[in-house]
Image: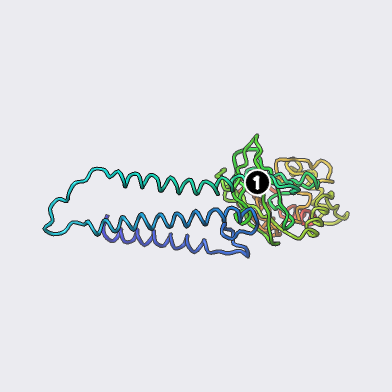
Amino acid sequence: MTGRTDRRLMMAVAGSCLALLLSACTRTSIPQDTFHAAGPEAHKINDLFWPVFWIAVGVFIIVEGLLVFALVRFRRRPGGGIPTQVHGNRRLEIMWTIIPALLLAGVAVPTVGTIFALAAKPPNALQITVTGHQWWWQVEYPTLHVTTANEIHIPVNKAVYVTVTSVDVIHSFWVPNLAGKQDLEPGHKNHLTIEAAQPGTYLGQCAEYCGLSHANMRLRVIAESPPDFLAWAEQESKPAEQPSAGTLAAQGEQLFATGACVGCHTIDGLKGAAGTVGPDLTHFASRTSFAGATFQNNAGNLSNWLHDPPAIKPGADMPSLGLTQDQIGALIAYLEGLK
Ligand SMILES: [Cu+2]
C-alpha cells in the first residue's frame, strides 16, 4: 500500500468512528442506559457495579503504576552490562496470589447477595408473561385478562414479576433503566423483576441476536400512576370497539374479517379473528408503536407497513398482501379506531 492509500484508509476509519460516536448521542427523554437506574432492581445492579468498578480502577492504577516504574527504573542505560539475573521471588509470588484471592473473595460477597436479591420473587408483585417472537413481544397480564404487544404498561412503585419464554429462538429481555437482561428460551420459563420509581417511557430491546430483524425487536415500558394503570387495564380487557355501519372503518373491518389478516391476528370481539402468529390487535390504537416497537403508530407508517411489511422490517412474517391504496386506507381507519 502507498502512503496515500494508508492515509485515506485511516481517514475513513476515523470518520466511521466519529459517526458511530455521534449516533450514540441521540437522546430520548430517559436515556436508555444502565447508569440511569430508574427503579430498585436497576439500583441493586448499580450498587454492585460501582464498588467493583472502583476496586478494578484501584488494581489497574497500582499494577500499571508498578509496571511503568519498573520500565523506567530498570531501563537499559548506555554503558550498562547485562543486569543480575533473578529467578523467582517467593515473597512476591505469595503476595500476588493472596491479594487477588482476598479481593475476589471480597467482591464475591456482595455479588452473590445481589444475584439472590435479583432472583427473589417479590411478594404481592404484579405478574406478567412476555413471550418472544421473531420479532416482537407478546405481553399478557393473566390476572387482568389483558393481552398486548411490544408495550408493557406498569404501575409505578410496584414490583412487576415478569415470566419470560419464547416460541421460536432465544431472545433476551432488556430494559436497561429498570433491570438486567433475562433470556427468553423456547420451552422454558425464566423470571425477572422490573420496577419503575417514576412515571415515564423506558425503552428496551432484544439483547440476544435472534435473526434478521433482531435490531427491530424493541419494546417500551410505560410506567404510570396506579389509577392510570388500572384505567388502561380496564380498557384493554374489553372487546374491540365496533365501527359504525357505513364508515370507512367498517369497510376496513369487513376486509380484515374476510382477508388473510384473521389467519394471524386476534381481535377480541371480531368473529373469526383468532390467529396467534402475529400480535393481538384488539386495542391496537392504544399503542404508540407497532412492529416490535420499531415504528411510531401513525397513518403514514401503517400505510408503508401494510403495503409491504418485509420491505421496511426485513424478514417479517407478514407478507406483502398486494393491497390497493383504498384497501390500505380502509384498514388504517379500522385499526386506528381500535382504542
Ligand atoms: Cu429477539
* Residue 50 rendering spot, x and y as whole percentages: 52, 57
* Residue 14 rendering spot, x and y as whole percentages: 39, 61
* Point 63% across, 53% down: residue: 41
* Point 22% across, 56% down: residue: 74
Q: What quarter of the picture does the C terminus occupy?
A: bottom right
* Residue 229 rendering spot, x and y as whole percentages: 78, 57
Q: Amino acid at mark 1?
A: Leu
- Residue lying farthest to the top in this orientation: 187
- Secondary structure of the residue carrying tag 1 is strand
* Point 78% across, 52% down: residue: 283
Q: Which residue is under mark 1?
A: 192
Q: Is residue 54 visible to us here? A: yes
Q: Nearer the viewer, residue 276 or 79?
A: 79
Q: Nearer the viewer, residue 39 or 314?
A: 39
- Residue lying farthest to the left in this orientation: 79
Above or below residue 304? Residue 127 is above
